[in-house]
């Protein structure tokens, strides 16, 4: 079983001076539909090119598009991948999720911060973290959650299922068209 281990800001200070302390429920993977943390870079074009040419990322179609200009992924292991959404305004959403080769891709993911920065910092070495719920920048991180993202109990490759359905459909159609030939024996 492959466990993915990371850190996520737990207690931090916002630009307004407010201190935020998150609870574990705030960062659980089931809640990632509402991105908590966003990163910002000044030039998404340059970052995108850098990530593809120098860091081994590839373009992918988003399963659930959110208005991003670029959607990139990089395999982290046989089970996990890093998915980045880069927006025209410079923001980046980053998630570690089950690789898209598996059906479980749609429901096992975690909003992350440091993984994306580690890949693009060779081009842009500043970390800007935006706390989306308050719509404010984080200016100081006091401590972190240490998160272990467990592999799903099952990993179901979806491509063999689709191929099987297509083959079964073609076979069914062909069998429905089966008739006696034109000449008698």
Image: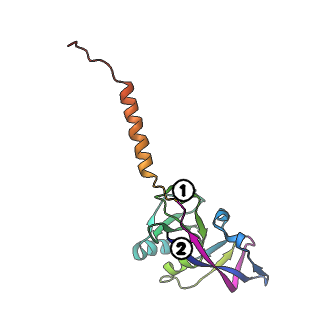
Q: Is residue 159 left or right of residue 132?
A: left
* Residue 136 vertical position relative to residue 140 in the rendered view, above or below: above
Asked which secondary structure carries label 2, the reply is strand
Are the two marked residues, 1 and 2, in contact with CB atoms closer than 8 angstroms? no
Residue 42 visible to an observer of this rendering: no
Q: Position of residue 143 (x, y in %)?
A: 68, 85
What separation in Å lies between label 1 and label 2 (alpha carbons)?
Answer: 22 Å
Q: Position of residue 117 (x, y in %)?
A: 54, 79
- Quadrant of the image containing the C terminus: top left
Mark 2 neighbour density, 10 Å: few (under 14) some (14–19) many (20 or more): some
Q: Position of residue 8 (x, y in %)?
A: 63, 78
* Residue indicated by mark 2: 4
Q: Quadrant of residue 166?
A: top left
Residue 135 visible to an observer of this rendering: yes
Question: Total label count?
Answer: 2
- What residue is at 37 percent from the left and 34 percent from the top? 171
Start-end of magenta stretch = 133-153
Residue 71 is covered by the magenta coloring: no
User: 170 or 55: nearer the eye?
Assistant: 170
Q: Is residue 56 left or right of residue 181?
A: right
- Display coloring: rainbow
* Residue indicated by mark 1: 63
């Amino acid at each position: 079983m492959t466990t993915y281990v990371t850190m996520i800001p737990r207690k931090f200070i916002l630009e307004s001076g407010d201190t935020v302390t998150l609870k574990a429920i705030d960062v659980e993977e089931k809640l990632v539909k509402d991105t908590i943390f966003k990163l910002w870079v000044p030039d998404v074009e340059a970052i995108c090119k850098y990530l593809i040419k120098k860091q081994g990322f590839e373009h992918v179609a988003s399963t659930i598009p959110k208005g991003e200009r670029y959607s990139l992924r990089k395999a982290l292991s046989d089970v996990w991948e890093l998915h980045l959404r880069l927006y025209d305004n410079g923001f980046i959403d980053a998630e570690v999720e089950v690789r898209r080769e598996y059906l479980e891709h749609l429901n096992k993911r975690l909003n992350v911060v440091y993984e994306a920065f580690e890949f693009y910092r060779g081009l842009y070495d500043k970390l800007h973290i935006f706390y989306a719920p308050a719509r404010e920048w984080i200016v100081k991180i006091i401590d972190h959650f240490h998160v272990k993202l467990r592999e799903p109990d099952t990993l179901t490759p979806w491509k063999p299922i689709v191929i099987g359905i297509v083959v079964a459909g073609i076979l069914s159609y062909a069998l429905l068209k089966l008739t006696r030939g034109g000449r008698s024996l």
